[in-house]
Amino acid sequence: MSNKTCPVPAPLNSVIGKVIFIAFLFFLSFLSRFIFAPLLPYISRDLLITTAQAGSIFLLGSIGLAIGAVFSGFISSKINHKRTLVLSVFCPGVVLLACIFARDLLAIQVAMTLLGVSAGLNLPSNVAVLSAIVTPADWGKAIAIRQSAPPLSLVLGPLLAVFFLKWVSWRIILAGIAGVIIFSSITLIKFGKFGDFPGDKPDLANIKAVFFCRSFWIMIILFALGIGGHLGVYSMMPLYLVKEHGLTPEYVNTIVGLSQISAFFMTLFGGWLTDKIGEKRTMGIILVISGVLNILMGITSGVWLKIIVFLEPAIIVCFFPSAFAALSRIVQPDFRSLAASWATPAAFILGGGLFPAALGYMGESSSIGMGISISGIVMILGASLVFFLNLLEKMEAGC
Protein backbone atom coordinates (compact mmCIF):
# COMPACT_ATOMS: atom_id res chain seq x y z
CA MET A 1 0.00 0.00 0.00
CA SER A 2 1.23 3.47 -0.85
CA ASN A 3 1.54 6.12 1.87
CA LYS A 4 1.78 9.11 -0.45
CA THR A 5 -1.14 11.41 -1.22
CA CYS A 6 -2.70 10.32 -4.51
CA PRO A 7 -5.48 11.80 -6.61
CA VAL A 8 -8.85 10.10 -6.45
CA PRO A 9 -9.53 8.27 -9.74
CA ALA A 10 -12.57 9.62 -11.54
CA PRO A 11 -14.69 8.61 -14.54
CA LEU A 12 -13.28 9.75 -17.85
CA ASN A 13 -16.03 12.28 -18.60
CA SER A 14 -15.24 14.24 -15.42
CA VAL A 15 -11.49 14.57 -16.15
CA ILE A 16 -11.62 14.71 -19.95
CA GLY A 17 -9.94 18.13 -20.08
CA LYS A 18 -6.93 16.89 -18.12
CA VAL A 19 -6.69 13.76 -20.25
CA ILE A 20 -6.70 15.84 -23.46
CA PHE A 21 -3.98 18.14 -22.10
CA ILE A 22 -1.86 15.13 -21.13
CA ALA A 23 -2.37 13.80 -24.67
CA PHE A 24 -1.26 17.18 -26.06
CA LEU A 25 1.99 16.99 -24.08
CA PHE A 26 2.55 13.50 -25.48
CA PHE A 27 1.89 14.90 -28.95
CA LEU A 28 4.61 17.53 -28.53
CA SER A 29 7.08 14.90 -27.31
CA PHE A 30 6.48 12.82 -30.43
CA LEU A 31 6.44 15.73 -32.86
CA SER A 32 9.79 17.03 -31.61
CA ARG A 33 11.46 13.72 -32.55
CA PHE A 34 9.55 12.38 -35.53
CA ILE A 35 9.43 15.63 -37.45
CA PHE A 36 12.90 14.52 -38.54
CA ALA A 37 11.46 11.61 -40.57
CA PRO A 38 9.74 13.73 -43.26
CA LEU A 39 12.65 16.17 -43.20
CA LEU A 40 15.30 13.46 -43.67
CA PRO A 41 15.42 13.63 -47.49
CA TYR A 42 16.19 17.36 -47.21
CA ILE A 43 18.54 17.05 -44.22
CA SER A 44 20.36 14.17 -45.96
CA ARG A 45 20.84 16.29 -49.06
CA ASP A 46 22.10 19.36 -47.16
CA LEU A 47 24.36 17.52 -44.71
CA LEU A 48 25.38 14.64 -47.05
CA ILE A 49 23.92 11.90 -44.82
CA THR A 50 23.76 8.30 -46.11
CA THR A 51 20.85 5.88 -45.64
CA ALA A 52 22.66 3.98 -42.88
CA GLN A 53 23.57 7.22 -41.10
CA ALA A 54 19.94 8.33 -41.29
CA GLY A 55 18.87 5.14 -39.51
CA SER A 56 21.44 5.79 -36.78
CA ILE A 57 19.73 9.07 -35.91
CA PHE A 58 16.64 7.24 -34.66
CA LEU A 59 18.74 4.64 -32.85
CA LEU A 60 20.44 7.41 -30.85
CA GLY A 61 17.05 8.93 -30.09
CA SER A 62 15.91 5.61 -28.63
CA ILE A 63 19.08 5.28 -26.57
CA GLY A 64 18.51 8.80 -25.24
CA LEU A 65 14.94 7.84 -24.36
CA ALA A 66 16.23 4.90 -22.32
CA ILE A 67 18.69 7.16 -20.49
CA GLY A 68 15.94 9.63 -19.62
CA ALA A 69 13.68 6.83 -18.45
CA VAL A 70 16.36 5.41 -16.15
CA PHE A 71 16.60 8.73 -14.33
CA SER A 72 12.89 9.62 -14.54
CA GLY A 73 12.05 7.87 -11.26
CA PHE A 74 14.76 9.75 -9.37
CA ILE A 75 13.64 13.07 -10.85
CA SER A 76 9.86 12.62 -10.42
CA SER A 77 10.38 11.40 -6.85
CA LYS A 78 12.14 14.70 -6.07
CA ILE A 79 10.13 17.28 -8.05
CA ASN A 80 6.82 15.36 -8.62
CA HIS A 81 5.26 14.27 -11.90
CA LYS A 82 3.98 17.68 -12.99
CA ARG A 83 7.38 19.36 -12.81
CA THR A 84 8.93 16.38 -14.57
CA LEU A 85 6.44 16.86 -17.40
CA VAL A 86 7.32 20.56 -17.57
CA LEU A 87 11.01 19.70 -17.84
CA SER A 88 10.35 17.07 -20.50
CA VAL A 89 8.38 19.56 -22.63
CA PHE A 90 10.60 22.64 -22.25
CA CYS A 91 13.92 20.94 -23.09
CA PRO A 92 12.90 19.74 -26.59
CA GLY A 93 11.99 23.31 -27.47
CA VAL A 94 15.51 24.46 -26.62
CA VAL A 95 17.08 21.55 -28.52
CA LEU A 96 15.06 22.21 -31.69
CA LEU A 97 16.06 25.87 -31.57
CA ALA A 98 19.71 24.83 -31.42
CA CYS A 99 19.19 22.72 -34.58
CA ILE A 100 19.08 25.97 -36.54
CA PHE A 101 22.87 25.94 -36.33
CA ALA A 102 23.37 22.26 -37.26
CA ARG A 103 26.03 21.84 -39.94
CA ASP A 104 26.84 18.11 -39.87
CA LEU A 105 25.55 14.68 -38.92
CA LEU A 106 27.00 14.86 -35.41
CA ALA A 107 24.85 17.89 -34.53
CA ILE A 108 21.67 16.07 -35.59
CA GLN A 109 22.72 12.95 -33.69
CA VAL A 110 23.34 14.94 -30.49
CA ALA A 111 20.01 16.75 -30.90
CA MET A 112 18.11 13.50 -31.38
CA THR A 113 19.80 11.97 -28.33
CA LEU A 114 18.75 14.92 -26.16
CA LEU A 115 15.22 14.79 -27.56
CA GLY A 116 15.14 11.11 -26.62
CA VAL A 117 16.24 11.90 -23.06
CA SER A 118 13.37 14.38 -22.74
CA ALA A 119 10.91 11.81 -24.07
CA GLY A 120 12.26 9.33 -21.53
CA LEU A 121 11.33 11.73 -18.75
CA ASN A 122 7.90 12.38 -20.25
CA LEU A 123 6.60 8.87 -20.79
CA PRO A 124 6.66 7.38 -17.23
CA SER A 125 5.11 10.49 -15.65
CA ASN A 126 2.57 10.67 -18.46
CA VAL A 127 1.46 7.08 -17.83
CA ALA A 128 1.51 7.46 -14.03
CA VAL A 129 -0.62 10.62 -14.04
CA LEU A 130 -3.16 9.31 -16.52
CA SER A 131 -3.67 5.99 -14.73
CA ALA A 132 -3.92 7.80 -11.37
CA ILE A 133 -6.66 10.29 -12.32
CA VAL A 134 -8.89 7.92 -14.35
CA THR A 135 -10.79 4.92 -13.00
CA PRO A 136 -9.50 1.53 -14.27
CA ALA A 137 -12.80 0.86 -16.04
CA ASP A 138 -12.04 3.80 -18.37
CA TRP A 139 -8.32 3.17 -18.87
CA GLY A 140 -8.79 1.79 -22.39
CA LYS A 141 -10.61 4.90 -23.60
CA ALA A 142 -8.37 7.33 -21.70
CA ILE A 143 -5.20 5.72 -23.04
CA ALA A 144 -6.74 5.72 -26.52
CA ILE A 145 -7.15 9.49 -26.30
CA ARG A 146 -3.52 9.83 -25.24
CA GLN A 147 -2.40 7.41 -27.94
CA SER A 148 -4.13 9.51 -30.58
CA ALA A 149 -1.27 11.97 -30.06
CA PRO A 150 1.45 9.95 -31.87
CA PRO A 151 -0.53 9.43 -35.10
CA LEU A 152 -1.62 13.07 -35.02
CA SER A 153 2.03 14.13 -34.84
CA LEU A 154 2.84 11.72 -37.67
CA VAL A 155 0.09 13.35 -39.74
CA LEU A 156 1.17 16.89 -39.01
CA GLY A 157 4.91 16.36 -39.51
CA PRO A 158 4.85 15.37 -43.20
CA LEU A 159 2.15 17.91 -44.03
CA LEU A 160 4.18 20.68 -42.39
CA ALA A 161 7.12 19.61 -44.54
CA VAL A 162 5.05 19.62 -47.73
CA PHE A 163 3.47 23.00 -47.04
CA PHE A 164 6.32 25.06 -45.56
CA LEU A 165 9.34 23.70 -47.42
CA LYS A 166 8.08 25.55 -50.48
CA TRP A 167 9.04 28.81 -48.76
CA VAL A 168 11.42 28.09 -45.87
CA SER A 169 14.19 25.64 -45.00
CA TRP A 170 13.89 22.66 -42.67
CA ARG A 171 15.74 24.70 -40.03
CA ILE A 172 12.95 27.28 -39.87
CA ILE A 173 10.34 24.53 -39.50
CA LEU A 174 12.21 23.18 -36.47
CA ALA A 175 12.43 26.69 -34.99
CA GLY A 176 8.68 27.20 -35.39
CA ILE A 177 7.88 23.92 -33.65
CA ALA A 178 10.32 24.89 -30.89
CA GLY A 179 8.37 28.09 -30.25
CA VAL A 180 5.08 26.19 -29.86
CA ILE A 181 6.71 23.70 -27.48
CA ILE A 182 8.24 26.36 -25.24
CA PHE A 183 4.94 28.26 -25.06
CA SER A 184 3.13 25.03 -24.12
CA SER A 185 5.57 24.34 -21.27
CA ILE A 186 4.81 27.78 -19.84
CA THR A 187 1.08 27.04 -20.15
CA LEU A 188 1.57 23.79 -18.26
CA ILE A 189 3.30 25.60 -15.42
CA LYS A 190 0.49 28.13 -15.02
CA PHE A 191 -2.62 26.07 -15.72
CA GLY A 192 -1.78 22.38 -15.34
CA LYS A 193 -3.88 20.99 -12.45
CA PHE A 194 -2.59 17.45 -12.29
CA GLY A 195 0.48 15.43 -11.36
CA ASP A 196 1.15 17.06 -7.98
CA PHE A 197 2.32 13.78 -6.48
CA PRO A 198 5.81 12.25 -6.51
CA GLY A 199 7.02 9.30 -8.50
CA ASP A 200 8.60 6.27 -6.89
CA LYS A 201 12.37 6.38 -6.59
CA PRO A 202 13.81 3.10 -7.84
CA ASP A 203 15.31 0.96 -5.09
CA LEU A 204 16.38 -2.66 -4.94
CA ALA A 205 13.02 -3.90 -3.65
CA ASN A 206 11.06 -2.06 -6.36
CA ILE A 207 13.43 -3.18 -9.08
CA LYS A 208 13.15 -6.81 -7.98
CA ALA A 209 9.34 -6.59 -7.91
CA VAL A 210 9.34 -5.43 -11.53
CA PHE A 211 12.33 -7.28 -12.99
CA PHE A 212 11.30 -10.65 -11.57
CA CYS A 213 7.88 -10.29 -13.19
CA ARG A 214 7.78 -12.46 -16.32
CA SER A 215 5.04 -10.33 -17.86
CA PHE A 216 7.31 -7.29 -17.67
CA TRP A 217 9.77 -8.87 -20.12
CA ILE A 218 6.99 -10.12 -22.36
CA MET A 219 5.59 -6.59 -22.54
CA ILE A 220 9.01 -5.27 -23.62
CA ILE A 221 9.02 -7.67 -26.57
CA LEU A 222 5.39 -6.95 -27.49
CA PHE A 223 5.95 -3.19 -27.30
CA ALA A 224 9.09 -3.56 -29.44
CA LEU A 225 7.06 -5.36 -32.10
CA GLY A 226 4.33 -2.73 -32.06
CA ILE A 227 6.75 0.20 -32.08
CA GLY A 228 8.83 -1.37 -34.84
CA GLY A 229 5.75 -1.98 -36.95
CA HIS A 230 4.60 1.60 -36.48
CA LEU A 231 7.34 4.12 -35.72
CA GLY A 232 10.17 1.97 -37.07
CA VAL A 233 8.50 1.73 -40.46
CA TYR A 234 7.38 5.37 -40.39
CA SER A 235 10.92 6.61 -39.66
CA MET A 236 12.32 5.08 -42.84
CA MET A 237 9.21 5.25 -45.03
CA PRO A 238 10.12 8.53 -46.80
CA LEU A 239 13.58 7.23 -47.72
CA TYR A 240 12.10 3.85 -48.73
CA LEU A 241 9.56 5.35 -51.11
CA VAL A 242 11.98 7.93 -52.53
CA LYS A 243 15.04 5.69 -53.03
CA GLU A 244 13.44 2.33 -53.89
CA HIS A 245 10.22 3.39 -55.63
CA GLY A 246 11.37 6.60 -57.30
CA LEU A 247 8.73 8.90 -55.82
CA THR A 248 9.44 12.57 -55.14
CA PRO A 249 9.94 13.74 -51.53
CA GLU A 250 6.97 16.11 -51.77
CA TYR A 251 4.63 13.37 -52.99
CA VAL A 252 5.94 10.90 -50.40
CA ASN A 253 5.44 13.30 -47.50
CA THR A 254 1.91 13.99 -48.70
CA ILE A 255 0.82 10.35 -48.82
CA VAL A 256 2.70 9.40 -45.64
CA GLY A 257 1.10 12.29 -43.77
CA LEU A 258 -2.39 11.58 -45.10
CA SER A 259 -2.00 7.88 -44.29
CA GLN A 260 -1.77 8.75 -40.60
CA ILE A 261 -5.16 10.50 -40.51
CA SER A 262 -7.05 7.21 -40.28
CA ALA A 263 -4.59 6.11 -37.58
CA PHE A 264 -5.68 9.07 -35.46
CA PHE A 265 -9.29 7.86 -35.42
CA MET A 266 -8.46 4.16 -35.27
CA THR A 267 -6.61 4.71 -31.99
CA LEU A 268 -9.96 5.50 -30.39
CA PHE A 269 -11.32 2.28 -31.90
CA GLY A 270 -8.39 0.45 -30.33
CA GLY A 271 -9.38 1.78 -26.92
CA TRP A 272 -12.98 0.69 -27.44
CA LEU A 273 -11.85 -2.74 -28.62
CA THR A 274 -9.60 -3.12 -25.57
CA ASP A 275 -12.49 -2.44 -23.20
CA LYS A 276 -14.67 -4.92 -25.13
CA ILE A 277 -12.46 -7.97 -25.69
CA GLY A 278 -9.52 -7.35 -23.35
CA GLU A 279 -5.90 -6.35 -23.65
CA LYS A 280 -4.38 -9.70 -24.63
CA ARG A 281 -6.79 -10.51 -27.44
CA THR A 282 -6.52 -7.02 -28.88
CA MET A 283 -2.71 -7.05 -28.89
CA GLY A 284 -2.53 -10.50 -30.49
CA ILE A 285 -5.04 -9.77 -33.25
CA ILE A 286 -3.50 -6.42 -34.17
CA LEU A 287 0.07 -7.75 -34.32
CA VAL A 288 -0.95 -10.58 -36.67
CA ILE A 289 -2.88 -8.31 -39.05
CA SER A 290 -0.13 -5.67 -39.03
CA GLY A 291 2.51 -8.34 -39.64
CA VAL A 292 0.71 -9.49 -42.77
CA LEU A 293 0.48 -5.89 -44.01
CA ASN A 294 4.21 -5.32 -43.38
CA ILE A 295 5.05 -8.39 -45.43
CA LEU A 296 2.94 -7.05 -48.29
CA MET A 297 4.40 -3.55 -47.94
CA GLY A 298 7.87 -4.88 -48.60
CA ILE A 299 6.99 -6.91 -51.71
CA THR A 300 4.32 -4.85 -53.50
CA SER A 301 4.56 -1.72 -55.63
CA GLY A 302 2.36 0.75 -57.45
CA VAL A 303 -1.26 1.11 -56.39
CA TRP A 304 -1.17 -1.85 -53.98
CA LEU A 305 1.80 -0.40 -52.13
CA LYS A 306 0.02 2.93 -51.71
CA ILE A 307 -3.09 1.18 -50.37
CA ILE A 308 -1.00 -0.69 -47.80
CA VAL A 309 0.85 2.51 -46.82
CA PHE A 310 -2.57 3.90 -45.86
CA LEU A 311 -3.92 0.73 -44.27
CA GLU A 312 -0.98 -0.42 -42.11
CA PRO A 313 -0.76 2.58 -39.73
CA ALA A 314 -4.53 2.50 -39.23
CA ILE A 315 -4.27 -1.07 -37.92
CA ILE A 316 -1.05 -0.98 -35.88
CA VAL A 317 -2.08 2.05 -33.77
CA CYS A 318 -4.90 -0.06 -32.32
CA PHE A 319 -2.17 -2.04 -30.55
CA PHE A 320 -1.04 0.73 -28.19
CA PRO A 321 -4.16 1.43 -26.07
CA SER A 322 -4.31 -2.27 -25.21
CA ALA A 323 -0.55 -2.47 -24.62
CA PHE A 324 -0.43 0.50 -22.23
CA ALA A 325 -3.52 -0.78 -20.41
CA ALA A 326 -1.82 -4.16 -20.04
CA LEU A 327 1.37 -2.50 -18.81
CA SER A 328 -0.67 -0.84 -16.05
CA ARG A 329 -1.95 -4.25 -14.94
CA ILE A 330 1.20 -6.37 -14.81
CA VAL A 331 2.30 -4.79 -11.49
CA GLN A 332 0.62 -3.04 -8.57
CA PRO A 333 0.13 0.77 -8.78
CA ASP A 334 3.20 1.63 -6.66
CA PHE A 335 5.42 0.01 -9.31
CA ARG A 336 3.53 1.29 -12.35
CA SER A 337 5.74 4.27 -13.17
CA LEU A 338 8.87 2.14 -12.70
CA ALA A 339 7.52 -0.51 -15.08
CA ALA A 340 6.66 2.16 -17.66
CA SER A 341 10.04 3.87 -17.24
CA TRP A 342 11.88 0.65 -18.09
CA ALA A 343 9.62 -1.35 -20.41
CA THR A 344 8.79 1.28 -23.00
CA PRO A 345 12.32 2.72 -23.38
CA ALA A 346 13.77 -0.77 -23.78
CA ALA A 347 11.13 -1.44 -26.42
CA PHE A 348 11.91 1.89 -28.12
CA ILE A 349 15.57 0.92 -28.43
CA LEU A 350 14.56 -2.31 -30.15
CA GLY A 351 11.58 -1.17 -32.22
CA GLY A 352 12.20 2.55 -32.65
CA GLY A 353 16.01 2.49 -32.74
CA LEU A 354 17.55 -0.79 -33.88
CA PHE A 355 14.69 -1.43 -36.31
CA PRO A 356 15.14 1.72 -38.47
CA ALA A 357 18.91 1.37 -38.15
CA ALA A 358 18.65 -2.20 -39.50
CA LEU A 359 16.39 -1.00 -42.32
CA GLY A 360 18.96 1.65 -43.18
CA TYR A 361 21.77 -0.88 -43.42
CA MET A 362 19.57 -3.27 -45.41
CA GLY A 363 18.85 -0.39 -47.76
CA GLU A 364 22.55 -0.25 -48.59
CA SER A 365 23.22 -4.01 -48.69
CA SER A 366 19.93 -5.25 -50.15
CA SER A 367 16.65 -3.31 -49.84
CA ILE A 368 14.58 -1.58 -47.18
CA GLY A 369 11.53 -3.42 -48.50
CA MET A 370 13.01 -6.80 -47.65
CA GLY A 371 13.65 -5.60 -44.10
CA ILE A 372 10.04 -4.47 -43.73
CA SER A 373 8.77 -7.88 -44.90
CA ILE A 374 11.03 -9.70 -42.44
CA SER A 375 9.69 -7.51 -39.64
CA GLY A 376 6.16 -8.59 -40.56
CA ILE A 377 7.07 -12.26 -40.14
CA VAL A 378 8.59 -11.52 -36.72
CA MET A 379 5.44 -9.64 -35.64
CA ILE A 380 3.22 -12.60 -36.54
CA LEU A 381 5.40 -15.03 -34.60
CA GLY A 382 5.73 -12.67 -31.62
CA ALA A 383 1.97 -12.25 -31.27
CA SER A 384 1.83 -15.66 -29.57
CA LEU A 385 3.52 -14.15 -26.49
CA VAL A 386 0.21 -12.63 -25.36
CA PHE A 387 -0.85 -16.09 -24.14
CA PHE A 388 1.91 -15.98 -21.52
CA LEU A 389 0.94 -12.59 -20.04
CA ASN A 390 -0.38 -12.48 -16.46
CA LEU A 391 -2.58 -9.42 -15.89
CA LEU A 392 -3.61 -8.57 -12.32
CA GLU A 393 -7.34 -8.62 -11.56
CA LYS A 394 -7.10 -7.21 -8.02
CA MET A 395 -5.31 -3.85 -7.78
CA GLU A 396 -4.19 -2.22 -4.53
CA ALA A 397 -4.76 1.46 -3.76
CA GLY A 398 -1.96 3.77 -4.85
CA CYS A 399 -0.63 5.84 -7.71
Image (cartoon, rainbow, N blue to C red):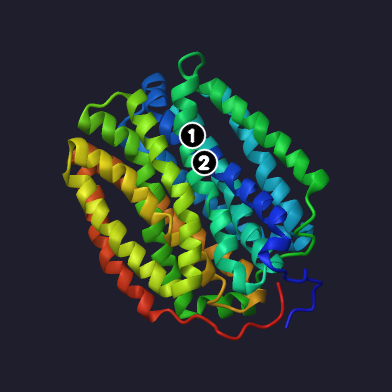
- Residue 251 is situated, as x and y percent measured from the top left of the image, at 33, 26
Camera-nearest residue between 350 and 142? 142
> Measuring 54% from the left and 46% from the top, which residue is drawn there?
116
Quick one: which residue is furthest to the top in this view? 167
Q: Is residue 87 above or below residue 220?
A: above
Determine which quarter of the picture holds residue 342: bottom right
- Residue 167 is situated, as x and y percent measured from the top left of the image, at 50, 13
Helix, strand or loop for disc 2: helix
Q: Are marks 1 and 2 in contact (CB under 8 Å)?
A: yes
Q: Is residue 85 above or below residue 252?
A: below
Determine which quarter of the picture holds residue 252: top left
**CA–CA distance between discs 1 and 2?**
6 Å
Mark number, residue 153: 2
User: What's under tag 1, amino acid-wise?
Assistant: Gly
Camera-nearest residue between 101 and 319? 319
Determine which quarter of the picture holds residue 331: bottom right
> Measuring 36% from the left and 21% from the top, which residue is drawn there?
45
The quadrant of the rendering that contains the N terminus is bottom right
> Measuring 60% from the left and 30% from the top, which residue is drawn there?
177
- Residue 100 is situated, as x and y percent measured from the top left of the image, at 57, 22
Q: Is residue 135 above or below residue 92?
A: below
> Measuring 62% from the left and 61% from the top, which residue is drawn there?
127
- Residue that label 1 marks: 157
Q: Is residue 131 visible?
A: yes
Q: Is residue 353 visible?
A: no
Helix, strand or loop for disc 1: helix
